[in-house]
Image (cartoon, grey):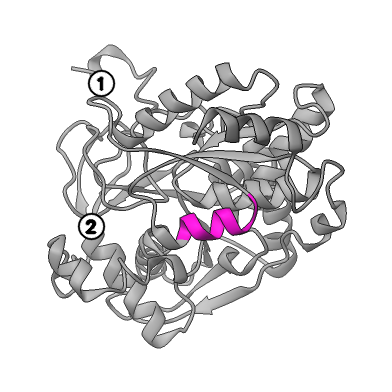
Amino acid sequence: MTTAVLATAATTGNRTAGTTGNRELLDLLGRTPLAHVTVDLPCPQPGFWAKLEGLGVGGMKARAAVSMLLGAEKRGELRPGAPVVESTSGTLGIGLAFAGQALGHPVVLVGDIELEPSMRQLLRAHGARLELVDRPEAEGGWQAARLTRLRELLTRLPDAYWPDQYNNPDNKAGYASLAAELVDRLDHLDVLVCSVGTGGHSAGIIGPLRRHWPRLRLIGVDATGSTIFGQPARARLMRGLGSSIHPRNVAYDAFDEVHWVGPAEAADACRRLARSSFVSGGWSTGAVALVAAWAARVHPGAVVATVFPDGPHRYLGSVFDDDFAATHGIEPATAATRPVEIPHPKAVEATGWARCGTVTDPVVAPPEENP
């Protein structure tokens, strides 16, 4: 993105929404369907509930995006018509494009060259401007490279606001509406399964839900190669969950256990969902569906719910593509049918589906847990 284009983003606003925005769009936020999923994943299971956030306008992260921008406006950190700059692997970008149109702010997004062409086109179609980094950093990978470029942009756009989704409390506050919708639809809930990336939606819904159901168990789902729960950071094929940094929005003390899921398991679950339940999605959706089905099997009679963060369309060239699977060594037919148990996140590196009942914040863990 050139300096001239950035200057245009800073001074002219979003040409679709205008500097005054269109706050009537906010009436479209949320109220997504709740589906009962009984498909074998991969084994027979009694069924779990799935909130289909991919069917919401702006996607799941539109809730967080609106919350972060409204909070910044209220505090005076985001001035009328000022640009919003953020790093994204795609999903939050769609949410910010929605929030930018609704609230009247141009949106500049920092992605990377692994962002799918279809997602690039969609973000631009919704009025966002893209800045793409072309190489990962040695430490922190693509995520760190995007944040480095973002900080450079902030020096060139002095009036811009950076939501900092990884550490912004308004991120998790935006999911209060999601929690309320689950309470409205379910008479009881025993187990909640959430994917973890920024940590926003798991932290944002567990508090309100536990006020209704104090004994509710929370299971976190991470990607292999993610460092969020104390595993070593590795290059990750899956996008939408996991992280190469430690987001401060993650409510470590709220989790009862964590699962790491690999690409083969997530892709197999996505394909099974698409074939037998019609509703499906990408890496995050496949991962949480796999673990939610496992939870429904191992806790007989329990009411289990999860959140499907997105739909399948973005992943037609990856999760659902046989050539992509072959190129990247993904064999859904060999996906694990149950998790490997590990005693502590630092005990062994998870290379496939693994489960751990010990959850600690790797940044503040006691010295004996950080050998």
Is any atom of residue 132 visible in this view?
yes
The relative height of residue 278 versus residue 177 in the rendered view (above or below) is: below
The amino acid marked with disc number 1 is Glu
Q: Using the rendered view, name the quadrant where residue 227 is placed.
A: top left
Which range of residues does the magenta coloring cover? 119-127
- The magenta stretch spans residue 126: yes
Numbered tag placed on residue 369 in the rendering: 1
* Residue at the disc numbered 2: 339
Q: How many neighbours does mark 2 have within 10 angstroms: few (below 14), some (14-19), or many (20 or more)? A: some
Q: Where is residue 152 in the image (x, y as percent from the top left)?
A: 48, 20
Q: Which residue is drawn at 37% across and 72% down?
A: 316
Label 1, secondary structure: give it: helix
Numbered tag placed on residue 84 in the rendering: none
Q: Which residue is drawn at 69% across and 30% down?
A: 10
The amino acid marked with disc number 2 is Pro
The relative height of residue 64 versus residue 43 in the rendered view (above or below) is: above
Q: Position of residue 301 (x, y in %)?
A: 48, 72
Mark 2 and mark 1: Cα distance apart in space: 23 Å
Q: Nearer the viewer, residue 111 or 33?
A: 111
Q: Residue at x 51, y 34 (%)?
A: 251
Is any atom of residue 209 visible in this view?
no
Give the residue furthest to the bottom. Answer: 276
Q: Using the rendered view, name the quadrant where residue 190 is placed.
A: bottom right
Left/right placement of residue 142 relative to residue 36 reads left
Q: Nearer the viewer, residue 35 or 72?
A: 72
Give the residue furthest to the front. Answer: 4
